[in-house]
Image (cartoon, helix red, strand yellow):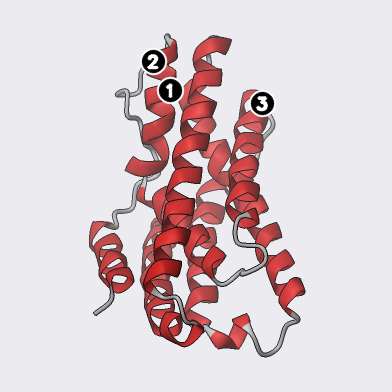
Amino acid sequence: MSTVSLFGMGLLLLASPAFAHHPTGGEIPSTVFEGFWSGLAHPVIGLDHFAFIVAVGLLATIQRAWGWVLPVVFVAGTLGGTGLHLGRVDLPGLELVISLSVLTFGLILALGRGVSGITMVPWVRSLTITVLGAIAGLFHGYAYGEAVIGAEMTPILAYLAGFALVQLGIAIATLTLARRWCSAPEAAELPLRFAGFTLLGIGATFLSSAVLG
């Protein structure tokens, strides 16, 4: 079994329906260190967020010409989403959209060649996935923003830097490792599909939690 598949199984075993993630115990960051640490931890301790970042990296492996664009656009979207939250702009259906984003990217990966090369022109497929990543980023970032409501500007900026760096690092590391382990397209097909089904399971778990309360 490939390393990608084993990693996907680990994600599924860790799945738990929770959307409130507070690495500082719910306290508002008051220093640069607290803001940066909270930013680093938020995308990692929330499995819904972490799973989606991994999905972004995995999907980037099949975006040959656009590989680095998807992670960057997603991270930019999360920064924008936090800005919307700090600006008191309301985004409805937050938990539903976050869980659906994991489920949708899992589905795209699980379908394999059904999406990645037969019915869609490659650049149209890449643009569609990138736009979906940007939209999802707004909602994931909006959720991150809850942790710094009421904080001073300095810890807020440190928080933004922290979660931007850790998300970009995870996505790029996933992209790099997946391409190294599955260098040939035919070798990548099965592991990426397996990872997609795993992400589908995680997304479905969080979606059921959001719907059922």
Per the image, the residue denoted by label 3 is 88
Q: 97 or 4, which is in the foreground?
A: 4
Q: Amino acid at mark 3?
A: Arg
Q: 190 or 25, which is in the foreground?
A: 190
Per the image, the residue denoted by label 2 is 33
Q: Position of residue 34 (x, y in %)?
A: 38, 17
- For residue 49, side relative to residue 17 (left or right): right
Mark 3 or mark 1: whose residue is earlier in sequence: 1
Q: Position of residue 66 (x, y in %)?
A: 66, 63
> Is the Cβ of the residue at disc 1 closer than 8 Å to that at disc 2?
yes
> Is the Cβ of the residue at disc 2 closer than 8 Å to that at disc 3?
no
Name the mark on residue 36.
Answer: 1
Q: Nearer the viewer, mark 3 or mark 1?
A: 1
Q: Quadrant of residue 4?
A: bottom left
Q: Nearer the viewer, mark 2 or mark 3?
A: 2
Spatial CA span between label 1 and label 2: 5 Å
Vertical order, 24 against 65 (above or below) = above
Quadrant, the N terminus: bottom left
- For residue 65, side relative to residue 38 (left or right): right
Residue in the picture at 56% in, 63% down: 60
